[in-house]
Amino acid sequence: MAGLELLSDQGYRIDGRRAGELRKIQARMGVFAQADGSAYIEQGNTKALAVVYGPHEIRGSRSRALPDRALVNCQYSSATFSTGERKRRPHGDRKSCEMGLQLRQTFEAAILTQLHPRSQIDIYVQVLQADGGTYAACVNAATLAVMDAGIPMRDFVCACSAGFVDGTALADLSHVEEAAGGPQLALALLPASGQIALLEMDSRLHEDHLEQVLEAAAQAARDVHTLLDRVVRQHVQEATVLLGD
Amino acid sequence: MASVALSEAEKVYIVHGVQEDLRVDGRGCEDYRCVEVETDVVSNTSGSARVKLGHTDILVGVKAEMGTPKLERPNEGYLEFFVDCSANATPEFEGRGGDDLGTEIANTLYRIFNNKSSVDLSSLCISPREHCWVLYVDVLLLECGGNLFDAISIAVKAALFNTRIPKVRVLEDEEGAKDIELSDDPYDCIRLSVENVPCIVTLCKIGCRHVVDATLQEEACSLASLLVSVTSKGVVTCMRKVGKGSLDPESIFEMMESSKRVGKVLHMSLQSILHKEESLGPKRPKVGFLG
């Protein structure tokens, strides 16, 4: 792939987007009837499913129960056919465990766990197709699933990735842009207060550029929030129509 | 397997209803629930299919990769099955919890395909003893609403129908070194014939009658089931009894006749749906999980 320009002179990326433009996002809540809450999101070619069970009694050892708040348990799993090269194990490897821990950290910051002491909330995320920005898609899907389950949260959790090429910050990286090896930032934001739930950066980035990249990711996360808000309102409207006046 | 707790009264209600050929949702003993099949759901696979049978949701992806043929069959490619019981279906499948069920289903799939006629494996051979196509069939169990084996076999058949394997040519130069060349046109590919691919029909024995396509509640009332793998012509490729109860021989013969009847109808409807979907061409609207 020598000579593949991530950002052309006219300011277009490989898939024709502008630097700060997001991929097409489509989402749906209530995909599965048997789970407490579920959601599906498509961000460009990245597809993720999230399912929430809870709050319910702690499974396994009772000693893990926290006396004043709920335990949030996350598992990240990506299907063996999700990547270009076939993956051998869907979950249990280091990357999936790390992603699970990051999701747990993100949602412990957002869910009002004090309302459900001594109980457990399970969030299971499944990536069906991975084309970059899998962490962001998982967080967005999980937010919708937690809302579908009716678990109270402080705010939406919206996530987006960002990179830096040729002096410009790019928002919502695709797989090709991630594989090119430049700096990548993953940001999970609570939009109303502007608080950051998770911030992770890979590779080298000069500190002078950090603010620009952070602002690009934050703006993209706020755009995602607008879309997710619309999806939730539409879902509630459909549900109330079905219930009748 | 994900199960549901039923009271004795509920079990008696279901058993009595089945004796009268009337199930809880109004079906007869040999009726399937409404099946939704969609192919080409995941784009970076060679073929994929999603099947929704009541509350059971299955996603199958087929990836074709080049490998070496097995020693005892040098002129054929082969299929590898992997079943992932995702924690989405039930929290019991978290971590390694779903491995047992996954291995059981994968072994059943190996057995039903373990015969000469199901899939034409010699069409997967590129050059004997050196290169062949290996089809990795990966099954993802997303929601468990009873009757897993049937839904999985329908999804595998649909995914194999949808599989497009690129055409390759083997070039040999003067020193004898072989080079494999992929054709330039991305739409130039070979398709598999799924005429003889079998589907599993599960018959659960409830009381003294048997039912097809049991829900979770009905599975909780049945002590023994018979899994029969039938092709579209009514040929049985594999048969297995599961469950902790026992079956007497007459009921096994009855169940087998029943499964052949039901299997033929199932294959016919599946073929017609797949051909109808194919005839809509590449412009058909893809729904996936958004619909």
Image (tube, coloured by chain):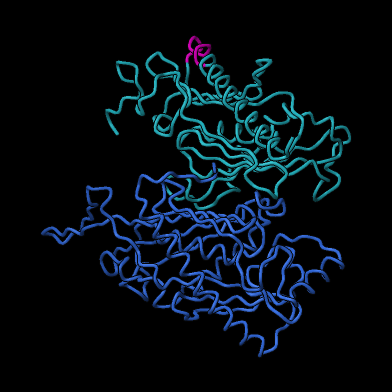
Residue B199 appears left or right of A230? left
Tell me residue B135's x, y (percent).
40, 61
Q: Is residue A207 magenta?
A: yes
Name the residue rendered at 42%, 60% in the picture: B274
- Quarter of the image for residue B208 reads bottom right
Residue B94 appears left or right of A1? right
Q: How many discs mark residues in the rendered view? A: 0
Reply above or below: B260 against A26.
below
In the picture as drawn, the residue positioned furthest to the right comes out as A67
In the picture as drawn, the residue positioned furthest to the left comes out as B174
Name the residue rendered at 74%, 64% in the picture: B217
Residue B123 appears left or right of A43? left
Residue B241 appears left or right of B179? right
Magenta span covers which residues?
Answer: A206-213
Tell me residue A144's x, y (percent).
65, 34
Front residue of A76 and A209:
A76
Reply above or below: A186 against B57.
above
In the rendered picture, chain B carries what hue?
blue
Name the residue rendered at 64%, 75% in the picture: B203
Reply above or below: B29 against A64.
below
In the picture as drawn, the residue positioned furthest to the bottom comes out as B250
Tell me residue B113's x, y (percent).
46, 72
- Quarter of the image for residue B201 reads bottom right
Classify the position of the C terminus of chain B by image quarter. top right
Front residue of B86 and B257:
B257
Reply above or below: B8 against A212.
below
Tell me residue B224's x, y (percent).
71, 77
Name the residue rendered at 65%, 28% in the picture: A233
Q: Which chain is cyan?
A: A
Classify the position of the N terminus of chain B by image quarter. bottom right
Q: Is residue A58 magenta?
A: no
* Magenta-drawn stretch, dominant element (helix, strand or loop): helix
